[in-house]
Amino acid sequence: MQLLNRLLNRFEEVVIGSAILIVSLLILVNVVLRYLFGTGINWTEEMVRFLMILVTFVGASICVRQGSHISVDFLFNLLKGKAKKWLTLCIYLICVIFTASMAWYSLEIIQQNMRFIQKAPALQIPMYIPYLILPLGLFLCTIRYIQEIYYIFRPGNKPSKEEAL
Amino acid sequence: MILALFVLLLVCLFIGVPIFISLAFPSMIAIMFFTDNSPSIIAQRLFGGLDQFGLMAMPLFIFAAQVMLDGGMARKLLDWSKALVSWMPGGTAFTTHFSSLFFGALSGSSPATVAAIGGIMYPELEKEKYDRGFSVGLISSSSSVAIIIPPSVTMILYGVATGVSIGSLFIAGIGAGILYTIVLGIYVWYRVKKDKQVVAEQVPFNPKQFISVTIKAIWALGIPFIILGGIYMGIFSPTEAAGISVVYSIFVSMFIYKEMNVKQLYKSSVKAAVLTAQVMILTGAAAAFGWILSSAQLPQMLANLVLEMNTSPVMFLLLVNVVFLIAGMFMDGSGAIMILAPLVYPIGLALGIDPVHLGVIVVTNLAIGMFTPPLGLNLFVANGITGVPFSKMIPSTLPFLAASLIALALITYVEDVSMFLPRLIYP
Amino acid sequence: GGGGSETSQGDAGGAEEGTESNEPIVIRYAHNQHESTPQHEGTVLFKEKIEELSEGRIEVQIYPNNQLGSLRETIESVQAGQIELAQQPIGMISNFVPEMTLNDLPYLFPSEEVLWAVLDGEGGEMYDSYLENQGFVGLGYMSGGPKQFSAHKPLRTTDDFAGTSIRAMEAPIVISTMEALGANPVPIAFSELYNSLQQGVVDGQENPNQSFVMLNLHEVQDVVTMTNHSWMIYNNIMNKDFYESLPADLQELVREAMEYANDEQRLLMQAEEESYISELEELGTEVVQLTDEEVEALRQATLPVYDEFTDVIGEDLMQSILDEIERLDNK
Ligand code: NA
Ligand code: NA
């Protein structure tokens, strides 16, 4: 279980770390090509967008694990002890209901795009491929929220901050 | 339906549900219970809201700031500011103020500037026995200029939300950001002169040392010229400028300063990617929320309402300031932009207000909101790195707040402060 | 619920009163243009006509300016039934219906008359059948005007195009056309078009004169060359399931109202096109007209594009439309 968790962490980090590096390099290559040869790669822009969407959704899962999603924690900081625990549970329940439903409903978009053909204009790949980012990221978020709910009741099992990068 | 949507949004925000879910969850509920549509539209908007090329500059500037922070460029910039102003009375305070300006100018992220500059300067301010409240107020307010001076993540978001040229916004931010820095600087100068508690040792100006740190910092100092020069001379677009500044920072950190290896680069990439997700997911969620508002034709209705009230531009700008200051106090700048900018932009346009000027006003408000009590991202970060309790921080940020409001009034009602440069460059 | 009071609630069996107080069927009609354009006017004409013809049984809500999502997303939403109706450029629809790439072949239509004759006739029928396979009902075509090239100099010949960098949409056929003309196509997002021209990231662009005027491109471009190399055509597409859920008489009325709106919109666009050209000249933009020989030379240069896209479009479809165009042209 611990091993699986660590593998999952590593997977998320490698995916988003390399994606954001590739984006920077792609942009550089495109500027250089245009400056030297007056032309560019026609799929750069589209690829950059899809990679950043990948970074966002997989990164969102890491944010869940780190508890770093931006929120208004005014009330949260006022509460102590039991009340705080129940509020946390309540927040995480809303979150997990949302991410799980969205992971499910995003499959509808994939289905639609597999039934009909829709191609990404520049890359000319079927659109369901980039759309797979949605169920992937939202499913990861769902797992993370379930983990967090588990840690509310078993705080001893929560990995330390360092382990979570 | 709209009422239910807003009530649920406010409840979620208040109890501390992450902002992106506070936006998207009520949208999903609204679709499920009030329409025949499938909630898959929310998933489509989460994706579609991010699927805009103009948005890509933001994560790249975040990435560049992270590399500068981890690769020694931020530190060299700070040494340079110190050599530049430390001969003045209150030199360390001014060093903090100016290095916030310069690092903020590079990074485009205000909390990142608090962390970078505050982390290094706070111990020095403490060593020289500055008032702790003053130091924290200085750090959290000076850093807010980061989102006014280009490049700015918040300006990019405004441009994406409204379709206003990001290049022009950047140019307009120069004047506004400089004015803002000067007004805050005057207050710092006043405190240094008047306040007995704020004492500092004066270090005489050392030209030799100044030249040596300038040479060391020259690579970092070059970034604004590369970004603005490259955009202005037509070598690359604002989005591409962000990508170029990433590659440039990596190059300088790894091969010139040699303070970064491949492993550290990987760590910086992951950190930047996580910060990216934090902000970008808000954009996707705001797009989902916005879809419901648009499909209920709410923006048009609101715009018509304000127009029918015969609001004068002066009154409207005052209204914008009040609304965005309040929003900035309670929520993150990116969230406020994504929710509010599409609502005020068409009204401003109808009243004949330059959309670039309006953008600068909105962004300045949000910059101030970042250190306005009770809730301000900069205050939290400053609290984290200095350990000064809120009860001590909050009273000492108030004078900085007052100074900022003077700057805001000038930026709002003297259009030329921000619009002079863009009109000169793009007649 | 309607304005029903206690009496109508108690009167459960009152079918007649029920239909009278029934909410109208709502059609959400999305497009990407500003409210000041003939394209928007076309959607308003449809709204007025269908609301009149159906005597209020149908209500149309118009969403201009991409309010419900980008072009791509809007088409996807129509396909999914999240939006009932959209007016979308054929160039975007061809990402869903590759056969319709045909319409963006350079110099396909010899005249505007032939263009409409093909789209209202055999060509349109074939497109409709492909649209239907993808979950759409095709409701005819509105006009966005012919596309022109602009730059800092006239672009009369392939020599003029050589070495000129031109902003291109990401569509492969647009890029191939520019390459065939000898230009360097540079893919740039529409949102960055003005800035890129202003800053000199690229030398030129192609769009209908309408976009040129509305984006104030005269501030950053000197010359518009009237190449008329292809047409910006907007297709009205409706969600198929929604269309089939309508009673037969309403289906008929929808078609009738849209046919009326399409015809009127094309006339509006023609009138507007003339005013765009005079506006350009007033703003100090040079408008270059090409001779027949120059047009023919450009057309010849773009012929390889036809071969390149035969497989995407389908050889049979391409041949039958080309034959049809030739027949209509000789008429
Ligand atoms: Na900045
Ligand atoms: Na705040």
Image (cartoon, rainbow, N blue to C red):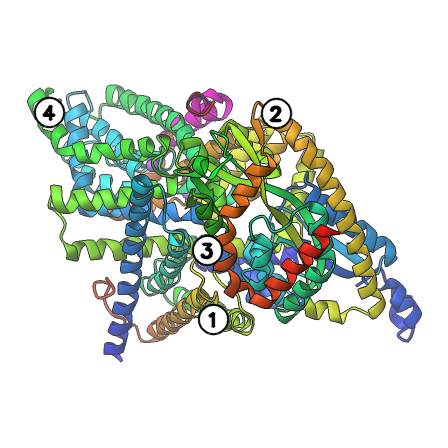
Seen at 47% across and 59% down, the residue is C308
Indicate the chain on which mark 4 is placed.
Answer: B
Q: Which residue is mark 1?
A: A103
Mark 2, residue position: C281
Question: Residue B408, how many percent across, how many down?
Answer: 45, 28
* Residue B19's disc number: 3
The disc numbered 3 marks a residue on which chain? B
Residue range corresponding to the magenta coloring: B400-423
* Element type at mark 1: helix
Quadrant of the rendered structure where residue A61 is? bottom left
Amino acid type at mark 3: Ile
Amino acid beneath label 4 = Ile
Mark 3 residue crowding within 10 angstroms, few (<14) / some (14–19) / many (20+) = many
In the rendered view, does A149 fall on the left or right side of B26? left
| Quadrant (top left/top right/bottom left/bottom right) for the N terminus of chain C | bottom right
**Can you give x and y, in whole percent of width and height, for residue B108 in the image?**
34, 40
Q: Is residue B363 above or below residue B270?
A: above
* Residue on which disc 4 sits: B211
Do the residues at pointers 4 and 1 share their chain?
no
Q: Secondary structure at mark 4?
A: helix
Residue in the image at 42% along x and 25% along y:
B407
- Element type at marker 3? helix
Chain letter belonging to callout 1: A
Q: Main secondary structure of the magenta part?
A: helix
As rendered, which of B192 and B5 lies closer to the eye? B5
- Mark 1 Cβ and ligand 2 under 8 Å apart: no
